Amino acid sequence: MAPAVLIENLQKRYGTVEAVKDVSLQIEPGEIFGLLGPNGAGKTTTIRCLCTLTEPDAGKVEVAGISVLANPRLVRQYLGYVAQAVAPDKVLTGRELLQLQAALYHLPRSLATARIEMVLNQLGLQEYADKKTGTYSGGLQKRLDLAAGLLHQPQVLVLDEPTVGLDIESRYTVWSFLRQIREAGTTVLLTSHYLEEIDMLADRVAIIDQGKVIAAGTPSQLKDQVGGDRITLRIREFTPNDEAVTAKTLLEAVPAVQEVIINAAQGNSLNLVVDPQSNALSTVQQALQTAGLPTFGIAQSRPSLDDVYLAATGRTLLDADLAAAATRDEKAERKKQMR
Ligand SMILES: Nc1ncnc2c1ncn2[C@@H]1O[C@H](COP(=O)(O)OP(=O)(O)O)[C@@H](O)[C@H]1O
Ligand SMILES: [Mg+2]
C-alpha cells in the first residue's frame, strides 16, 4: 500500500526567506504523525504545500501515491485540513457553516444532511448547532473546525496546531477525538510546538527546525537515540555557587555519571546525564551523603523530546520559541519606527 503521505526534499521560499529548506517524511495509513518544532520552523508551510494551498519550489509531495502537484483536485478529496487560526464567520450558525463546507466539497444535499448530523454527534455539538458561531468559546470553535475538516470523510486529516490557545479540557477533547478517528482508520498529521502533546499522541514524529527535519522516529526511538537517563538534583532549595561547583566535581567522578550541568536559572540545581537503567540514583545520593552534602530533591527520568531537540540544536524548544517571539517583536518594532 502506498504511504498515506510522502514528502521528499520539499523546498519553499518566500522572497529571501527559506521557509522550508529540506523536509522529507513518510506517513503510513492509520497512524498519528506529529510534526514538532518551534515557531517559524516551517511546519505550516510544509502542510500548506501538502494541502495544495501553496506550490512548492522543489520536491515530491504525494497523498496515497497521488502527486499533489499533478492532481490537486483529486488529492483534496483525500485530505481534510484544519487550519491553525480561523477567523470564524460570526453570523452563521455551526450547522450553516457545515452546510457551506459540504457545498464546497459538492456533497449531494441528502448525503450532506446525514454527514452533518454525524459529525455534530461525533463532536458533541448538537446543542450548539443552531447557535451563531460568534457565541462559541475557543474550544467549541475548534470542535466545529474539526467537524468541518471531517465532513467529506477524508483518509488523511491534517491539523495545524489544533490545541493552541485552548483550555486544558478542550485540549483533552481534541486529543481523545484524534485517537478515536485513528481507531476508525483515519490517518492524522498534526503540527505542534507542544512537545508533551506530540509525545503523548503521535505514533511517530518528525522534529523540524529552521526548515529541516533534524530527527524522526517513534518518540521512544528518538529518546533512546539521545542516550542516557536524566537526573535532576537540588542540594538545597537555593544552592550557593561554591557548593554547586563542589558537587559537580564530586559527581563527575561517579562512574555512571556522563555529564553534570549547573542550572543557574533554577537556583543552581544540577542536571545529570547518567547511564540508562543503572542504579545511578542511589550511587549519586550515596556520593553526596559521603561528602556531607544534603539533598533537597532528586529525581530520575528518561530523556524527553526536548532533550532530543536540545541534542540536535544546542537549545531547548522553549528557548527557540522565546527567541522566535523576540525576533517577531523586533521586526514589529522596526516597522513601527519606519512609519
Ligand atoms: N506568506 C509568507 N510570506 C513570507 N514569509 C513567510 C510566509 N509564510 C511563512 N513565512 C516565513 O517562513 C518561515 C516558516 O514559517 P511557518 O511555516 O509558518 O513556520 P511554523 O508554522 O513552524 O511556525 C518563518 O520565518 C515565516 O516568517
Ligand atoms: Mg505554524
Image (tube, rainbow, N blue to C red):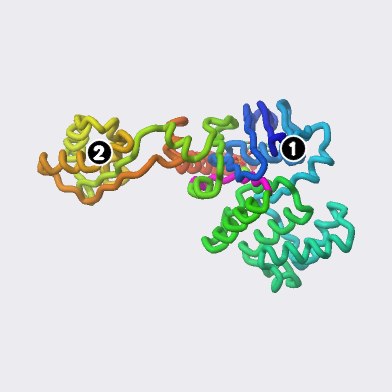
Q: Magenta-highlighted stretch: main secondary structure?
A: strand
Q: Secondary structure at mark 1?
A: loop
The residue to which callout 1 is attached is 64
The local crowd at label 2, few if under 14, some if 14 to 19, many if 20 or more residues have their Cα within 10 Å, is many
Q: Is residue 36 left or right of residue 79?
A: left
Q: Quadrant of residue 245?
A: top left
Q: Residue at x 44, y 39 (%)?
A: 316
Residue 4 in view in this figure: yes
Q: Quadrant of residue 337?
A: top right
Q: Residue at x 84, y 53 (%)?
A: 104
Residue 330 in view in this figure: no
Q: Which mark is residue 280?
A: 2
Q: Earlier in the sequence, mark 1 or mark 2?
A: 1
Q: Is residue 264 left or right of residue 293?
A: right
Q: Is the CB of mark 2 within 8 Å of ligand 1?
A: no
Residue 69: x and y in percent read 79, 32
Q: Residue at x 16, y 41 (%)?
A: 286
In the image, residue 104 above or below residue 306: below
Q: Which residues are magenta?
A: 186-195
The local crowd at label 1, few if under 14, some if 14 to 19, many if 20 or more residues have their Cα within 10 Å, is some
Q: Secondary structure at mark 2?
A: helix
Locate the C terminus by quadrant. top right
Q: CA distance from mark 1 to mark 2?
A: 48 Å
Q: Amino acid at mark 1?
A: Ala
Q: Which mark is residue 133?
A: none
